Image: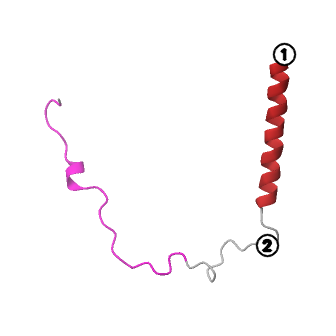
Amino acid sequence: MTDIDVLLAVAGLTVTVLVVAGMILITPRGTVDAFDDVTDPQGAELSRADAIDPAHTAARRRRVGPTG
């Protein structure tokens, strides 16, 4: 192995260790309820509007004949 191979291996190992340590440090401690509706107000004030057709009528038309 050349010196550059060893340097890349050490750099890769260092980055891997730092990423794993960061993931461990940002993980919340204790139990977290993932489906707690009481403290999650997201979507509480949404209206009950009807859904619209996402494809416009011009987008559904077919071209007849040669293109260009």
Residue 24 falls inside the magenta stretch:
no
- Mark 1 is on which residue type? Thr
On-image quarter of the N terminus: top right
Mark 2 vs mark 1: give the one in front.
1
User: Is residue 64 placed above or below 60 in the rendered structure?
Assistant: above
Check disc 2: other Cα within 10 Å, few if <14, some if 14-19, many if 20+: few
* Residue that badge 2 annotates: 31
Asked which secondary structure carries label 2, the reply is: loop
What residue span does the magenta drawing correspond to? Answer: 42-67
Q: Which mark is residue 52?
A: none
Residue farthest bottom in this picture? 38
Q: Position of residue 10 (x, y in %)?
A: 85, 31
Instruction: Tell me which residue sits at (81%, 21%) in the image.
Output: 5
Instruction: Tell me which residue sits at (77%, 62%) in the image.
Output: 27
User: Is residue 30 placed above or below 57 in the rendered structure?
Assistant: below
User: Is residue 28 placed above or below 17 in the rendered structure?
Assistant: below
* Residue that badge 1 annotates: 2
Q: Position of residue 29 (x, y in %)?
A: 82, 68
Q: Position of residue 9 (x, y in %)?
A: 83, 29
Residue 59 falls inside the magenta stretch:
yes
- Main SS of the magenta part reads loop
- Mark 2 is on which residue type? Thr
On-image quarter of the C terminus: top left
Instruction: Tell me which residue sits at (80%, 49%) in the image.
Output: 20
Residue 36 lies in quadrant: bottom right
Residue situated in front as seen by the camera: 7 or 57: 7
